[in-house]
Amino acid sequence: MNTWKERLSNYFFSETRVNTLGILRFFLCIGIVRQVYARSRNMLNLELTDGTYDLPPIAHLLPFPSIENAAQFEIFYLLLTASLFMAAVGFLTRFNLIFSGLGSIYVSAILYSVGFFDHEMAPISQILLILAFAPGSLSFSVDRLLLYFFKKDVRQKTDVLTYFADMHASLWGKRLILLLLAVVYLSAGLSKFRYTGFKWLDGQTLGYYLSEEPRAANEDRQLFYGQNTITEEHKWKDGFGMHAHTYGNYQTSNFWNEVGLYLSDHPFLMMLLSIMAVSTELALFFIILGKWYQNALLVLAYMLHTGIGLLMGLDFGTYRILIIFLLDWELIFDFVLKKSALARRTFEGLVSLKLKYFS
């Protein structure tokens, strides 16, 4: 038992020499500003009147007043954007990360209540809350600079750049983010089998998304399917029983559209891509193992999101930023330095041999 306790303690509370949470904080906050802006444009096109939407239970637990019209949403959006920018530069960092995380969850809840679930924004908002409490997330922040200049004892112990960068930090914040992502990816993989069994692997779903149909017209790219046999009490808000929906293909590049159409015309390739995509999502649960498992699987995740972006025009830019800074950079730097030292010793050995035998 003590061995497991020690392993768990070492896993979560050991220290890294390459803390990337401060840089991650900056890029995530800037990335989610873009997400919130895009979603706010969608919301301002809706009439948020009483009865139009019904917030999920979690929204009622958040410390925000109910939003009943577009003008109120615009005010909330401006406050959230300001908070995200302050969190990005690191001014009143922890407070603004909490407000930004909860505010982003609230925006996601409003979107969800009108039938839209943002797969990118939902987990990122939770990660902002983890960063609000995680050690090391204040690195490269205005707060860190102010603390340095106002604390004489800190100035006597270290220089400003070392304190500002704060490269040494406990790993539990990063580990918690990895655990959250592991569950998200595992859920994404398992959900494909939930209703269809193994039929999703036949390639027809991906083949549809890369075909001509979802690109046909801007208004018809995303389709919703209802059931006319559903009972009245189960009809979804506007009188329809929504049964399923499709994603749209928003790629505008002629080259990548041609690549997608070529792939969709070859069922074997689509089946292979489907199997690879689901296998990657399921395997990503094991990023919690850390070390090279973590790095190799995160590279696969980056390739997955990049492929979706190229073939379907779905950016996943914030996810890709997240993946880059969740890599085990300490392991990478140590590996590069060891190889560099080995290369240097090899080079010096060859030079000495040349001098010995050819001088």
Image (cartoon, rainbow, N blue to C red):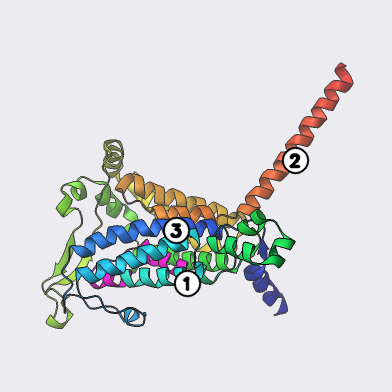
Name the residue type under label 3: Leu
Residue 303: image location, x then y, percent: 44, 48
Which residue is the site of mark 3?
28
CA–CA distance in space, label 1 to label 2 = 44 Å
- Magenta span dominant secondary structure: helix
Which residue is the site of mark 2?
341
Q: Secondary structure at mark 3?
A: helix
- The residue sitting at 31% across, 72% down in the picture is 109
Do the residues under discs 1 and 2 have CB atoms within 8 angstroms?
no
Q: Nearer the viewer, mark 3 or mark 2?
A: 3
Which residue is the site of mark 1?
95
Residue 90: image location, x then y, percent: 50, 62
Instruction: Mark 3: give few (<14), some (14-19) or many (20+) Cα within 10 Å.
Output: many
- The residue sitting at 19% across, 53% down in the picture is 221
Is residue 219 in view?
A: yes
Q: Earlier in the sequence, mark 1 or mark 2?
A: 1
Q: Nearer the viewer, mark 3 or mark 1?
A: 1
Q: Is residue 86 left or right of residue 328?
A: left
Instruction: Mark 2: give few (<14), some (14-19) or many (20+) Cα within 10 Å.
Output: few
- The residue sitting at 26% across, 37% down in the picture is 254
